[in-house]
Image (tube, rainbow, N blue to C red):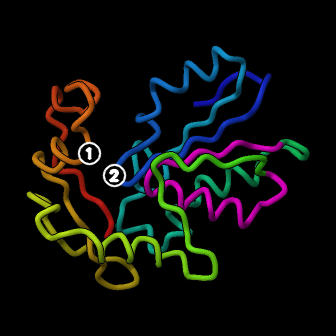
Amino acid sequence: MEGSRSGKHFMLVHGLCHGAWCWYKLVPMLRAAGHRVTALDMAASGAHPARMDEVPSFEDYSRPLLDAVAAAPAGERLVVVGHSLGGLNIALAMERFPRKVAAAVFLAACMPCVGRHMGATTEEIMRRIKPDFFMDMKRMALNTSQGPRPALVFGPKILAAKLYDRSSGSDAGYDAGEAGVPVLG
């Protein structure tokens, strides 16, 4: 999803278990204000063709963003926006390409701890979450080239109560019955 050539260039990164589609209301507003917009699907997310078992690392998961930032024309400074887990994706892009990022927006997003490994943030979040938070979420294992990896499947109860509790039914996908979305753990 790209936009016009005037204004700032925004790169939008979705959160866990989502895709570029989640920015469908923001993209036209930014374009109408004269900005370029690129809403990306991270690997194995949204319409990206990779399967989850083909994405062995966070860097591989972030590859669409890293490639898009690397491909930005010389001298262009981007505004990267990450929601939820997308905060870690944009932090990685900022670290790799500091001269290509003018600003970063962490929108209700994970932000890495300075001096600690990238996973420290998610480990801390998981440590603080009470077991009943997970409701009808199911745990499973994915067989990958690097061995089994844990994954989670969001059920309709957790989607309705925790993720889309302030969204209309059509925005949340309830009208289409889109529940049971697998998520890498």
Tell me the residue at 46%/46% (across/down).
Answer: 14
> Left or right: 15 with respect to 166?
right
The tally of labels here is: 2
Above or below, 133 against 160 in this view is below
Camera-side mark, 2 or 1 = 1
Q: Position of residue 64 (x, y in %)?
A: 58, 53
Q: Residue at the far bottom: name it.
A: 147
Q: Considering the numbered disc 1 on the image, is that residue within a helix, a strand or a loop?
A: helix
In the picture as drawn, the residue positioned furthest to the top comes out as: 32
Three-letter amino acid code at the position of disc 1: Leu
Residue 182 in the image, given as x and y percentages of width and height: 25, 57
Residue occupying image coordinates x 57% and y 31%: 1
Q: Residues within 10 Å of mark 1 (few under 14, many from 20)?
A: few
Residue range corresponding to the magenta coloring: 77-100
Q: Is residue 88 magenta?
A: yes
Q: Quadrant of residue 165?
A: top left
Element at badge 2? loop
Q: Mark on residue 12?
A: none
Name the amino acid type tagged 2. Cys
- Whether residue 139 appears in magenta in the rendering, the answer is no
**Which residue carries the number 1 mark?**
163
Query: How far is mark 2 from mark 1, CA to CA?
Result: 10 Å
